[in-house]
Every structure is written in C-alpha cells, then in structure tokens.
Image (cartoon, helix red, strand yellow):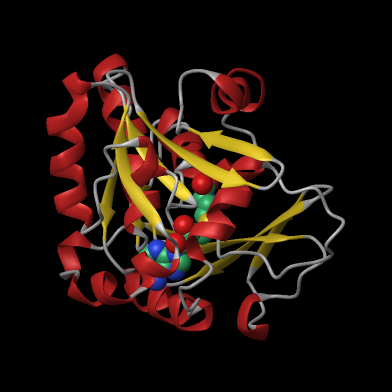
Amino acid sequence: MQNQQLTIAISYSDATQQERAAALAQELHLPLATTDTEKAGYKFLLEQSAQHLAIHWYKEEGILTFVVEYLTGSAAHRRQFGGSTRQLIARAVGFKKDYHPTIIDATGGFGRDGFVLASIGCQVKLLEQSPFIYALTADGISRLNAEEPDIKLSVEHIDALHFLPTLQDNEKPDVIYLDPMYPARSKSAMVKKASQFLQALTASYPMHEHQLLFSSLEHAKKRVVVKRPNWAGHLANFTPNITYQSKTTRFDVYTCGN
Ligand SMILES: C[S@@+](CC[C@H](N)C(=O)[O-])C[C@H]1O[C@@H](n2cnc3c(N)ncnc32)[C@H](O)[C@@H]1O
C-alpha cells in the first residue's frame, strides 16, 4: 500500500484537536499516533493543530515542516509583487480583462499556481491524487476561503485521469492546466521545501503525464497549458501552438476546440 510505504501517520498538537485528527486519520486511512513512542515510528507526521494542518518530515539532518499558506509567505509575496494579470501564467491561460477562463488544474499539488490564477479572478478547481497533499492543500484552502471568499479556489481528491472523462460538455473548463513533476536534473540542485515534500510524497505514484496531456486535450474547451522547466523538452514530444518563456520556466499552450 502506498500509505504504508511512506510511513506516515496523523497526530495532533494538543488534546483539543484529538477528535479532528481522528476524523482525518479515518478519512485518509492512516494510523493515529498519540504517544511520543508511537510518533517516533514514522518518517512523516501530519499534525493537526487549532491553526492548521502541518506536515513534519523527520530527516537525519533535522525536522522539515511545511504548511500550505496562501495569505502569508511566498504565495502572498508572489501575489503582491508578481501577481499582475500580465504575468506569463495569466497570458498562457488566455486571461484578459474581460475574459477570466474557468480552469481545472489537473496536477493540483499545493495549489500555488492555482492560487495565482484564482487570485486574478479565474475560477480554479484543483485535482490532486495524493491524499496527503490533498489534505494539506484542502486545509490551506479552507483558511483562504474564510479570509477571502471571493477567491474561487477549490480542491478535489481524485485522479485526474478518472475525473476528466466524467465531464459533461457543459462542465468542461475553458483551460486545463498541467504542472507534472519535472524530470530530475541533478542531485546538486537545491530543491525548495514545497518541492521536496511534493517529490517525497508522490514518489510512489506513477506519473502518467503523457496520458494526462492527451486526456486534457479531449476535455478542455479552449486550451491546455503545460508548465515545464526551460531545459525540458515538450511533454510527450508534442509541439505546442504557443509558448511563453521566462528565464527558468516555459508554458506550452495547446489550443483545442472541444
Ligand atoms: C509538480 S506538482 C504540482 C505543483 C502545483 N502546480 C503547485 O503549484 O503547487 C504535481 C502534482 O500533480 C499530482 N498529480 C500527478 N498526476 C496526477 C493525476 N493523474 N491526478 C491528480 N493529481 C496528479 C501529484 O500528486 C503532484 O502533487
């Protein structure tokens, strides 16, 4: 089982959170670690506190902790200083002053890209296959919704390859956005904290990225946007219609008329 390979359990910061933690453990089919001895048996702990859900990763060199935050930290900084509607990601999805596409982000992750698109006015639904990443992202979104109800960002725990074919014509989004895990480049590259967690938590999942592209092309109304590092080739060697490129990142745009 994927969950067991990862040696991950749910814990809580104090007794007031025990019930919430137990409900989450049941939902994710994970053990609830209550004592310090029990907790010590796991490499990752998802810890419920009154403020948020955090993930702790017990590494040889120390504990790495991560919480999905949209209104503080790097997501807020990106929104404040890079969040204009002229940024590449906005242009890639076709955003215009009078056209705010509906978007399914089929590789939702921690929703950082989805948040950028939702905060400029798009309605964004994230799909996330990993229960742990989903739980952390859903927690971040519930706090975001409480503070900023006008930002339309939601997440569903599902495999996009199962979800996309269920869409009726009137449910198809204008855009399907894909940010598959990048092919590893070199061991020496410093990987940011969120990316380290994404890689560790999804290591046991097969990445059907080619199928995702072809399924997305069938189910988006207007375009599919694929985020790639500049040095990587086109997904599935499939040539895009338009490319938007910065120093490090590329958005390959495939237009479609469904
Ligand atoms: C590189 S991360 C995306 C990061 C995201 N763009 C962000 O801003 O946080 C890729 C994510 O896609 C998810 N994923 C990959 N294939 C999927 C699928 N078929 N259905 C749903 N999620 C998938 C992985 O579990 C992982 O969390």
List the single residue furthest toward the right: 188
Residue 52 percent across, percent down from the top left? 34, 25
Q: Nearer the viewer, residue 75 or 202?
A: 202
Residue 176 lies left or right of residue 24; in this view the side is right
235 up-or-down from 130: above or below:
below
**Position of the C terminus by quadrant:** bottom left
Q: Is residue 223 visible?
A: no
Q: Nearer the viewer, residue 193 or 90?
A: 193
Residue 193 percent across, percent down from the top left? 64, 41
Residue displayed at 59% across by 18% down: 80
Residue 66 percent across, percent down from the top left? 52, 35
Query: Number of numbered discs present?
Result: 0
Residue displayed at 54% across by 21% down: 76
**Position of the N terminus by quadrant:** bottom left
Give the image quarter of residue 215: bottom left
249 up-or-down from 2: above or below:
above
48 up-or-down from 10: above or below:
above
Residue 249 lies left or right of residue 189; in this view the side is left
Give the image quarter of residue 54: top left
Give the image quarter of residue 137: top left
Residue 40 percent across, percent down from the top left? 44, 45
Residue displayed at 62% across by 21% down: 77
Residue 70 lies left or right of residue 199; in this view the side is left
249 up-or-down from 79: above or below:
below
List the single residue furthest toward the front: 37
